[in-house]
Image (spheres, helix red, strand yellow):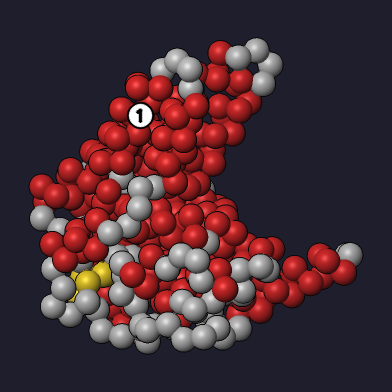
């Protein structure tokens, strides 16, 4: 094993098993990737070390397992096949049907992590449904212009598939931090909306506008698409800004969460593990708010999530 590989292995071990510290300085890009890579491990450690958090994390999974067993008992001659068929179908359901439970778990994880008081960010059903629909439309529309490259000979298909893969990883991270959203004591959803309004447009909207300014053909169409995407993305401006400000850390976090999502059995616990990990990341970024990577731009974790006051890193 080369010295660099030994160093990376040691850093992964330290980040995963050592004290839950703030991320490395922004210029240490590789170390920040490794830090992000180990965040789900830290989230799992926190769950296993706290009985109340673990109970909250296992509750949705227990409901799914009970439903699968009950359904499989209706066809005992093919119990195993029915169980796993139902499991594959029902595994994503807790994320949709138990949003209030996960909101309470996020607030509890923040308090247990020592980041101050918090209240669950519980949205009305209509607002939650709108966000679900808006996100689905946004994910498709924002990469639609890149889809035109799919018809380019030789490299077009490769570029398109690469963009889709990176876009999927990007939204895994955005969804993780969205699930960790909490409210300050006394704060309302209207207050959150007002704070989000202060944030700039997402990075991909800015790219669309820059591209439209230089296009000889189709500039008005791309500008209109940018306006639509900007409006659809407004609920996630804080999470999108967080990804933009901390790209290397988010690369590691995206890779590990994607791996967790693809792991059998553990993927049922994917949401609570990543949710707790995201609350830890938001808390640590809040503690490191004066780090050199945040000098030029305030951390969304500070401005929007209103985490503890920053101290010099």
Q: Quadrant of the N terminus?
A: bottom right
Secondary structure beneath dot 1 equals: helix
* Image coords of residue 256 (percent x, y): 56, 57
User: Is residue 264 toward the left or the right of residue 101 in the image?
Assistant: right
Q: Toward the viewer: 32 or 26?
A: 26
Q: Toward the viewer: 10 or 153?
A: 153
Residue 124, quarter of the rendered image: bottom left
Residue in the image at 51% along x and 71% along y: 295
* Image coords of residue 292 (percent x, y): 57, 73
User: Is residue 46 toward the left or the right of residue 161 in the image?
Assistant: left
User: Is residue 185 toward the left or the right of residue 154 in the image?
Assistant: left
* Image coords of residue 189 (percent x, y): 15, 63
The relative height of residue 269 versus residue 160 in the rendered view (above or below) is below
Q: Name the residue under label 1.
A: 223
Residue in the image at 47% along x and 56% along y: 243
Q: How many marks?
A: 1
The crowd level at tag 1 (other Cα within 10 Å; few <14, some 14-19, many 20+) is some
């Amino acid at each position: 094993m080369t010295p660099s590989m030994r160093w990376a292995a040691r850093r992964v071990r330290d980040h995963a098993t050592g004290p839950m510290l703030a991320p490395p300085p922004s210029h240490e890009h590789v170390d920040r990737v490794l830090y992000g890579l180990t965040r789900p491990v830290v989230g799992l450690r926190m769950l296993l070390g706290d009985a109340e958090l673990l109970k909250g994390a296992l509750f949705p999974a227990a409901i799914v397992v009970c439903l699968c067993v009950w359904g499989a008992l209706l066809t005992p001659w093919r119990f195993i096949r029915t169980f796993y068929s139902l499991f594959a179908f029902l595994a994503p359901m807790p994320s949709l049907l138990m949003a209030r439970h996960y909101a309470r778990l996020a607030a509890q994880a923040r308090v247990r992590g020592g980041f101050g008081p918090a209240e669950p960010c519980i949205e009305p059903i209509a607002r939650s449904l709108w966000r679900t629909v808006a996100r689905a439309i946004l994910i498709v529309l924002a990469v639609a212009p890149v889809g035109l490259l799919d018809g380019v000979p030789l490299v077009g298909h490769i570029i398109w598939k690469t963009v889709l893969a990176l876009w999927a990883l990007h939204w895994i991270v955005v969804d993780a931090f969205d699930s960790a959203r909490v409210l300050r004591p006394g704060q309302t959803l209207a207050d959150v909306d007002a704070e989000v309004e202060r944030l700039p447009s997402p990075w991909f909207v800015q790219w669309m506008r820059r591209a439209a300014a230089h296009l000889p053909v189709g500039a008005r169409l791309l500008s209109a698409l940018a306006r639509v995407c900007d409006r659809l993305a407004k609920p996630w401006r804080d999470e999108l800004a967080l990804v933009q400000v901390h790209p290397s850390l988010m690369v590691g976090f995206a890779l590990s969460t994607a791996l967790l999502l693809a792991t059998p059995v553990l993927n049922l616990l994917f949401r609570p593990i990543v949710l707790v990990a995201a609350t830890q990341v938001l808390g640590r970024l809040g503690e490191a708010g004066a780090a050199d990577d945040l000098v030029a731009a305030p951390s969304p974790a500070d401005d929007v999530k209103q985490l503890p006051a920053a101290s010099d890193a």
